[in-house]
Image (tube, rainbow, N blue to C red):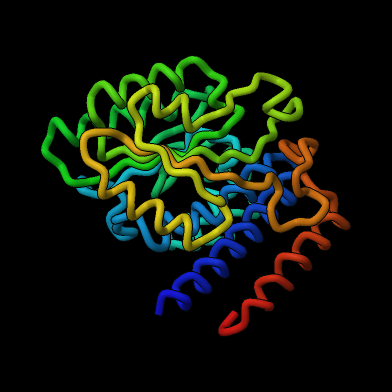
Amino acid sequence: MENEKILELKKIATEIRLGAVEAVFNAKSGHPGGALSSADILACLYFNELNVDVSNPKWEDRDRFVLSKGHSCPGLYSALALKGYFDKEELKSFRHTGALLQGHPDMKAINGVDMSAGSLGQGFSCACGMALAGKLNNKSYRTYALVGDGESQEGQVWEAIMFASHYKLDNLCMIIDNNGLQIDGRVSDVMNVMPYESKLEAFGWNVISIDGHNIAQILDAFKKAKEVKGKPTAIVAKTIKGKGVSFMEDQASWHGKAPNEEQYNIAVSELTAYKNSLGGNN
């Protein structure tokens, strides 16, 4: 049964990637690289971890998810569409004037979005506030936030990290999409933020390091995070920017660029071939 779950989540992650590529291609703009690197994490969150009710997206006791690196929203939108929050056809109008799905998530317009995203770093601070509110209101929900490694160059992120430790927010889980690239190149060259582990531990966090494309490791990390009491947990997920599309992988140029038709067709072909290789019902 466990292997079946992992296989199913691999397929869902591939569907998330296909939806993200579809969205960016039709928009002729957007950010595919970080959407593809975080797809496995999103699959595990929305199809195994998060306690949510699609029919009641504002349910007070739902788990919260904040995409702090909001520009990678094609991945989030694809996951939400697969979950059933809105029709997958909406992905084709991504970033179009007047469309539901814009270049950053909008909590007022999109079912399933718990926090609007804007300037990098702010989303994670909001997640900390949600977690503290849960504590103060004696709620059992958990809050998850996906943060970029380039994003964590922002001082506000580290203020929030200090805040979460101070208030012992053990209902908070930060996932760092550690793909090593940002718009201007390698994170280590622009403004090195490594090593995460020792820095976060010094700030009073529980830290788990994983391969962010290994479904079993992702699921195990979420399980362990829920068992920790008295401190928040950070999952440092080592990932590959553009994962799943050969010409996008580990290329900073695909941080914020849409594929042309030829590239789109190659991307869809590669992702579809991988999904088919997993077997079972497609």
Q: How many marks?
A: 0
Judge left or right: residue 14 versus residue 189: left
Residue sitting at 69 percent across and 34 percent down? 181
In depth, the one of 96 and 266 nearer the eye is 266
User: Residue at the spot x=56%, y=83% of the render?
Assistant: 281
Residue furthest right as drawn? 262
- Residue 183: horizontal and vertical position, in percent? 72, 29
**Residue 45 shows in the view:** yes
94 vs 156: above or below: below
Percent position (x, y) of residue 33?
69, 44
Q: Residue furthest left?
A: 138
Identity of the residue drawn at 66% across and 60% down? 18
Residue at (56%, 51%) from the top-left corner?
211
In the rendered view, would you say 209 is above or below 271? above
Residue 90 seen by the camera: no
In the displayed structure, does residue 92 sit left or right of residue 25?
left
Quarter that holds the N terminus: bottom left
Depth order, front residue of 166/57 = 166
- The location of residue 238, given as percent across then percent down, is 59, 44
Give the image location of residue 22, x and y in percent: 69, 56
Q: Considering depth in this image, is 82 or 98 the residue closer to the camera?
A: 82
